C-alpha cells in the first residue's frame, strides 16, 4: 500500500498572499508577480505591474463555476442504456469516487506544494520569475492547481468556439490576473479537496475524455475509484499534454511520462521507491473503450425512438425557453432520461419489420406500438437502419416532420373505424343499413369550416360484385367503400372531423391541417403510424385516448426532476362506442380482410388499409395489451407495390391484409409470447 504523506493545514487564498500582502496588499502582490511572470524583460516589470494592479482591482470579486458539461443518457423502460449523448464526454463524480492514488499522482506532478500554499505559490512564482528573466522568455509558469482549474473553467465555457478557446488559453497579462484573483476567491470558499475534485472533473485527458471518470473509462474501461497506481500515474501525466502523451497513439511517450509521475510520487512520499520501481517495470496496458455517442449507437432499431426522444426534449418549452437552451440541455446537461421503450417489444417489432421488408427494398416498412390506457410508446421499428450513410435514413417514418419524421402516408381504409366512431357517438347504430352498390355518387357534405361539397363524383368498391345492402359490421369486415361514403354523409363531415380530433388526429404528418373532404372516409389524409396506433389504442381502452408519450422521467445531473410530458388521458368516445367498434374490428381479423393478421392465442382486432394503386398498405390493430400500426410504402417514388419483390418475396396484388398484416401479427405475437391472454370487449351486434 502507498505510504501516507503528512500535509500542512489548508490555507485560504487570503492567507496565500498574506506574507507579502502585509506589506503591499494582495492586489499589488498579484500585479507585481503576474507582471514578472509575463514580462521577463526586467525593465518592463514596473510599468506592467501598475497596470496589473489596476486590472486586479477592477475585476468582480465573485467567481461561480458554471455547471460542467456532462453526457446525457437515454434509458429504456428496463433501465438499459439506449444511447449516451454529449458535447463533452464527462461524468462528474464526487471525491469519494476518485481513487486517492489519482489525487496524489496529479498533485505530485502538477503542483507538489498544493497543500502548503494558497491560491498563489509565492515560492514557485519567484522561481519562475528568476528562470524567465535568465532565459529572456517565458520558459516556466507558476500556476497552481487552483489557477489551472480557473483556466479550465473558462476553456470549458468557451465550448467548441475556437476563438473563445484561444482567448481562454492566451498567455496574456490580463488572463493571468483574472486567474489569480478568482483562484484567491476559490480558496476562500472551497477546501483543497473540493478544488482538487473539481479539477479532476473538468480537465481534459485526451481521446474525447473530459474528467477523470470518462478518462478511466476511455483508457482502462474502469471507474475512477478503481484506478491502480500505474493507471493513475498515466492519467495524471496526460494533463500537461493530452495529445503528446496519448497512450493510444504515442505509447512510448506515454510510458516515459507515466514513469516520471511515478518518480515524483516516490520523491514526495506518496508511495515508496519500491512501489514506484515495481510500477515502472510494468508495461502500459490499455483496455480502450472507444467513444460512442448519439442515437446512431442505439441497437435493435432503437435509433428512431432515440431521435424521437431528442425531438421531445428540444421542442418542448418545459425543457427550456428557447431552442438553443433546450439543445444545450440535451447535449451538455447530464440528463438522465427514462423512457417508455420496452426492449422486448422493440426487438419483436424490429425483427418482424426487417424480416418482411428488407433494408434494400424500394418499399419501406414502419411500425409503432402504443400501450392502451397509458399512451406509452413501447416500440418504433423501421426496415431501413438509422443513420446518414447510403442505405440508411435519419427520417423516422413513424412520426411527422415536426418530430424528425416524414409526411406520413395516406391511411386508406384504416380511417373507416373513425368514421364509424363518429356515427355511433352521434346516434347511429351498428344496425344502420345502406344499399351500398358497387358505385355511387358522393353525398353532399359540409365540413366544420363551412366548406360545402355538393353531391357528385363517384365512389366505388374494390370488387364489382361487392354490393349491398350492408349493415355496419359486415361493411367493416369487407371494407365496403360505398357504405362508408353514405355513413359519412349521414353523420356529417364536420362530426367526423371532430371525432378524429378527439382521437388525437388534427393534422397530417407534414404538419398541414387535417383535410376534411369527403374522401377522408377512405383515408385520403397522410397520417403517421404513431397517430394511428394512438387512435386505435383508445378503442382498446374502452374509449380512453392518451396522448403518446416517450418519456417517463427526466432528471438533471444534480438530481433535480424536470417535468416530463404527460399523456393527458381523457374519454374521447364512450365505452359503448369503443366496445362496439372492437367487436366489429374483431370480425375483420376473424373472417374479413384482415385474417392474415389474426393471432392464434388471444383476441385481436384491427383494420386493413390499401390506397389507390396499392401505393401504401396498412394494418392497424390491437389486443387488450398492445395497439400498433404498420405501414409499407414506396417512400421514394410513390409507386405501386403490386408485382414488386418485398422482403425476398414476389408480391402480386399488394394489400393491407397480405403485406402489412403479417408484419403486425408476427411482431405482436412475439411481443406477447408467454404473457397470459386478456379478452377484448364483445357486445351484441345486429
Image (spheres, helix red, strand yellow):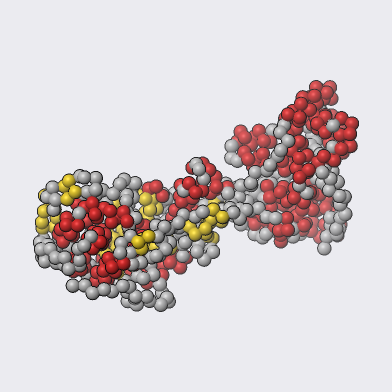
Instruction: Judge whether 327 appears above or below 163 on screen.
Output: below
Residue 343, horizontal then vertical, whole percent: 47, 65
Quadrant, the N terminus: bottom right
Horizontal side, residue 208 vs residue 271: left or right: left
Horizontal side, residue 271 vs residue 298: left or right: right
Residue at the far front: name it.
427
Instruction: Judge whether 50 appears above or below 394 on screen.
Output: above
Horizontal side, residue 36 vs residue 66: left or right: right
Residue 417, horizontal then vertical, whole percent: 25, 62
Give the residue at x 73% y 35%: 61
Residue 272, horizontal then vertical, whole percent: 86, 58
Residue 672, horizontal then vertical, whole percent: 40, 72
Instruction: Judge whether 450 appears above or below 41 on screen.
Output: below
Quadrant, the C terminus: bottom left
In the image shown, does 610 or 274 lie closer to the viewer? 610
Q: Answer yes or no: is residue 640 visible.
A: no
Give the residue at x 23% y 51%: 494
> For residue 111, which quarter of the picture?
top right
In the image shown, does 111 or 634 lie closer to the viewer? 111
Horizontal side, residue 474 vs residue 123: left or right: left
Give the residue at x 31% y 58%: 632
> For residue 289, which quarter of the picture?
bottom right
Amino acid at each position: 500500500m502507498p505510504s501516507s504523506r503528512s500535509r500542512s493545514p489548508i490555507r485560504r487564498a487570503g492567507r496565500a498572499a498574506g506574507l507579502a500582502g502585509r506589506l503591499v496588499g494582495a492586489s499589488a502582490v498579484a500585479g507585481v508577480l503576474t507582471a514578472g511572470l509575463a514580462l521577463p524583460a526586467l525593465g518592463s516589470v514596473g510599468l506592467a505591474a501598475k497596470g496589473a494592479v489596476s486590472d486586479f482591482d477592477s475585476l468582480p470579486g465573485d467567481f461561480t463555476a458554471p455547471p460542467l458539461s456532462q453526457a446525457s443518457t437515454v434509458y429504456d423502460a428496463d433501465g438499459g442504456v439506449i444511447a449516451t449523448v454529449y458535447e463533452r464526454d464527462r461524468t462528474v463524480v464526487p471525491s469519494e469516487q476518485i481513487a486517492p492514488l489519482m489525487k496524489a499522482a496529479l498533485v505530485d506532478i502538477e503542483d507538489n506544494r498544493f497543500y502548503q500554499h494558497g491560491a498563489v505559490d509565492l515560492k514557485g512564482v519567484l522561481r519562475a520569475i528568476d528562470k524567465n528573466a535568465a532565459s529572456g522568455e517565458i520558459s516556466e509558469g507558476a500556476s497552481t492547481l487552483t489557477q489551472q482549474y480557473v483556466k479550465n473553467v473558462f476553456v470549458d465555457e468557451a465550448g467548441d468556439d475556437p476563438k473563445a478557446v484561444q482567448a481562454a488559453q492566451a498567455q496574456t497579462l490580463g488572463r493571468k490576473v483574472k486567474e489569480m484573483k478568482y483562484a484567491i476567491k476559490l480558496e476562500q470558499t472551497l477546501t483543497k479537496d473540493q478544488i482538487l475534485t473539481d479539477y479532476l472533473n473538468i480537465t481534459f485527458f485526451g481521446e474525447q475524455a473530459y474528467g477523470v471518470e470518462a478518462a478511466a473509462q476511455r483508457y482502462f474501461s474502469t471507474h475512477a475509484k478503481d484506478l491502480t497506481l500505474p493507471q493513475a500515474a498515466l492519467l495524471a501525466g496526460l494533463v500537461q499534454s493530452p495529445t503528446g502523451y496519448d497512450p493510444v497513439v504515442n505509447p512510448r511517450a506515454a510510458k516515459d511520462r507515466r514513469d516520471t509521475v511515478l518518480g515524483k510520487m516516490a520523491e514526495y512520499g506518496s508511495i515508496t521507491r519500491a512501489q514506484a520501481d515495481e510500477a515502472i517495470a510494468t508495461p502500459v496496458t490499455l483496455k480502450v473503450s472507444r467513444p460512442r455517442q448519439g442515437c446512431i449507437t442505439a441497437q435493435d432499431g432503437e435509433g428512431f425512438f432515440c431521435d424521437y426522444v431528442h425531438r421531445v426534449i428540444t421542442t418542448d418549452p418545459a425543457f427550456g425557453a428557447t431552442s438553443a437552451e433546450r439543445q444545450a440541455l440535451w447535449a451538455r446537461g447530464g440528463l438522465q432520461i427514462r423512457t417508455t421503450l420496452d426492449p422486448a417489444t422493440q426487438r419483436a417489432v424490429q425483427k418482424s419489420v426487417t424480416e418482411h421488408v428488407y433494408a434494400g427494398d424500394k418499399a419501406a416498412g414502419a411500425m409503432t406500438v402504443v400501450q392502451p390506457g397509458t399512451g406509452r410508446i413501447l416500440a418504433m421499428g423501421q426496415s431501413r437502419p438509422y443513420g446518414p450513410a447510403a442505405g440508411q435514413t435519419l427520417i423516422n417514418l413513424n412520426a411527422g416532420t415536426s418530430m424528425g419524421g416524414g409526411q406520413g402516408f395516406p391511411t386508406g381504409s384504416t380511417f373507416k373505424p373513425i368514421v364509424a366512431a363518429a356515427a355511433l357517438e352521434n346516434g347511429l347504430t351498428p344496425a344502420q343499413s345502406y344499399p351500398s352498390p358497387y358505385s355511387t355518387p358522393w353525398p353532399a357534405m359540409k365540413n366544420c369550416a363551412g366548406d360545402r361539397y355538393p353531391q357528385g363524383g363517384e365512389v366505388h368498391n374494390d370488387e364489382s360484385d361487392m354490393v349491398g345492402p350492408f349493415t355496419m359490421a359486415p361493411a367493416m369486415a369487407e371494407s365496403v367503400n360505398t357504405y362508408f361514403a353514405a355513413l359519412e354523409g349521414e353523420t356529417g363531415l364536420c362530426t367526423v372531423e371532430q371525432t378524429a380530433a378527439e382521437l388525437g388526429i388534427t393534422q397530417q404528418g407534414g404538419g398541414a391541417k387535417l383535410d376534411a373532404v369527403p374522401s377522408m372516409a377512405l383515408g385520403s389524409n397522410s397520417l403517421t403510424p404513431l397517430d394511428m396506433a394512438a387512435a386505435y389504442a383508445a378503442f382498446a381502452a374502452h374509449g380512453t385516448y392518451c396522448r403518446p408519450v416517450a418519456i417517463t422521467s427526466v432528471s438533471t445531473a444534480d438530481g433535480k426532476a424536470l417535468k416530463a410530458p404527460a399523456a393527458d388521458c381523457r374519454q374521447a368516445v364512450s365505452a359503448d362506442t369503443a366496445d362496439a367498434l372492437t367487436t366489429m374490428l374483431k370480425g375483420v381479423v376473424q373472417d374479413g380482410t384482415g385474417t392474415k393478421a389474426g393471432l392464434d392465442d388471444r383476441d385481436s382486432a384491427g383494420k386493413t388499409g390499401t390506397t389507390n394503386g396499392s401505393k401504401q398498405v396498412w394494418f392497424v390493430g390491437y389486443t387488450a395489451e398492445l395497439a400498433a400500426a404498420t405501414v409499407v410504402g414506396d417512400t421514394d417514388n410513390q409507386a405501386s407495390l403490386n408485382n414488386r419483390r418485398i422482403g425476398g418475396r414476389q408480391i402480386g396484388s399488394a394489400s393491407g391484409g397480405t403485406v402489412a398484416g403479417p408484419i403486425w401479427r408476427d411482431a405482436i405475437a412475439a411481443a406477447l409470447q408467454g404473457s397470459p391472454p386478456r379478452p377484448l370487449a364483445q357486445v351484441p351486434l345486429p
